[in-house]
């Protein structure tokens, strides 16, 4: 049976607690689940502590944020079965602090222009994450009828990048793609380029695949375009890459809500992923 290998919880910018997701995966017929929260050790540690829950096998995972400075785009890299190691924990702590500082500045500015908004309420929503995301700010506004949803017109006016920069946008600094890929190698993770269509990363995908720096590509994703899916499938076949899929589940915190398991990874690809992860850990032990 398949697995949903891309989901988010209250450990980052999702609205559903991690302990609920295995039940949702089970109801969707999934045998495997990856809680892949943004730049957070919490989902990794949860999976290592709960290898099987509700009959569903949990795969330790994280979605790491990087930046393609050549093309001026964010990049998301899914990392599966990483070691719970100091370099990865330090990266997550660093990103949590950068996010916290950036979004707190946005909150201070929002309090000046919106008297109904209180930073403390956003921090309460963010308590499981250990940092602060724009999603937590938007949830406060949405619940008071001050926004037209999570990521619609009000979000764009406050946090948008293009065509006009949002009036309270402050962005944390992201590490270069090369550095994040090197970190994933250090922690012996299996690296998959997430949803290349979302951040216009097809050119980067071709470059990284040609350099042998990816183990796989995420194809079955709600925001990948049909054209990109076709090319990614061809590239994966030509380069013997893993083919993964996931819902990118965020619960309420999304434009178009989709249930866990709406997009998935086939069981033979999950077997390949786990075999590769085990081989990497065994080769390091022998060395």
Image (cartoon, rainbow, N blue to C red):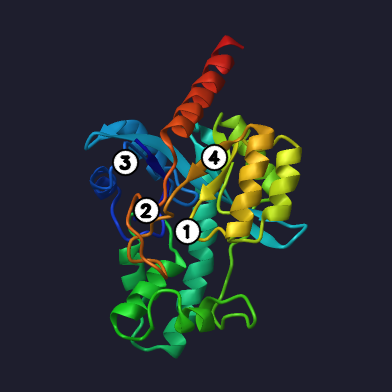
For marks 1 and 4 on the same chain, the one whose residue lies earlier in the sequence: 1
CA separation in Å, label 3 and label 2: 10 Å
The reply to whether discs 3 and 1 touch (Cβ–Cβ < 8 Å) is no
SS category of the residue bearing label 4: strand
Q: Residues within 10 Å of mark 3 (few under 14, many from 20)?
A: many
Q: Quadrant of residue 113?
A: bottom left
Earlier in the chain: of badge 1 and badge 2, it is 1
- Residue, x 48% and y 52% (percent of image)? 38
Task: Assess whether mark 2 and mark 4 are in contact (beta carbons under 8 angstroms).
Answer: no
Query: Tag 2, which secondary structure?
Result: loop
Q: Compute the Cα span from label 1 to label 2.
A: 9 Å
* Residue at image point 44% right, 46% down: 36
Above or below, 89 relative to 199? above
Q: In this view of the protein, can residue 87 be seen by the observer?
A: no
**Marks 3 & 2, CB-CB < 8 Å contact:** no
**Lower sequence index among marks 3 and 2:** 3
Position of residue 3 measured from the top left corner of the image (x, y, whole percent): 38, 40
Q: Earlier in the sequence, mark 3 or mark 1?
A: 3
Q: Earlier in the sequence, mark 4 or mark 2?
A: 4
Mark 2, other Cα within 10 Å: few <14 / some 14–19 / many ≥20? some
Instruction: Say which residue label 1 marks.
Output: 222
Relative horizontal placement of residue 106, taking residue 70 as reference (left or right): left
Label 1 secondary element: loop
| Residue at 50% from the left image edge and 30% from the top image edge | 273
- Which residue is more in the foreground, 198 or 161? 198
Answer with mark 4 or mark 3, whichever residue precedes in sequence: 3
Q: Which mark is residue 30?
A: 3
Residue in the foreground of this view, choosing between 32 and 88: 32
Q: CA distance from mark 3 to mark 1?
A: 17 Å
| Callouts 1 and 2 close, C-beta under 8 Å | yes
What is the spatial separation of the Cα atoms under label 1 and label 4, in whole angstroms?
15 Å
């Amino acid at each position: 049976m398949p697995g949903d290998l891309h989901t988010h919880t209250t450990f980052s910018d999702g609205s559903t607690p991690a302990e609920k997701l295995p039940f949702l995966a089970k109801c969707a017929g999934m045998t495997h689940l990856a809680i892949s929260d943004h730049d957070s050790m919490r989902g990794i540690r949860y999976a290592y502590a709960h290898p099987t829950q509700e009959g569903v096998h949990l795969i330790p995972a994280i979605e790491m944020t990087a930046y393609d400075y050549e093309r001026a785009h964010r990049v998301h890299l899914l990392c599966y079965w990483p070691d719970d190691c100091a370099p990865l924990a330090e990266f997550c702590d660093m990103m949590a602090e950068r996010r916290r500082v950036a979004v707190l500045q946005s909150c201070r500015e929002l309090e000046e222009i919106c008297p109904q908004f209180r930073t403390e309420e956003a921090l309460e929503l963010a308590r499981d994450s250990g940092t602060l995301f724009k999603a937590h700010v938007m949830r406060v506004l949405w619940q008071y009828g001050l926004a037209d949803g999570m990521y619609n017109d009000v979000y764009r006016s406050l946090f948008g990048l293009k065509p006009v920069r949002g009036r309270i946008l402050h962005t944390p600094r992201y590490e270069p793609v090369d550095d994040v890929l090197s970190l994933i190698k250090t922690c012996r993770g299996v690296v998959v380029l997430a949803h290349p269509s979302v951040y216009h990363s097809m050119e980067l995908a071709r470059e990284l695949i040609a350099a042998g720096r990816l183990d796989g590509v995420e194809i079955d994703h709600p925001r990948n375009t049909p054209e990109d899916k076709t090319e990614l499938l061809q590239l994966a076949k030509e380069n013997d890459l893993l083919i993964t899929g996931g819902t990118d589940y965020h619960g309420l915190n999304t434009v178009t809500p989709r249930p866990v398991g709406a997009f998935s990874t086939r069981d033979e690809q999950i077997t390949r992923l786990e075999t590769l992860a085990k081989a990497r850990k065994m080769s390091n032990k022998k060395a």
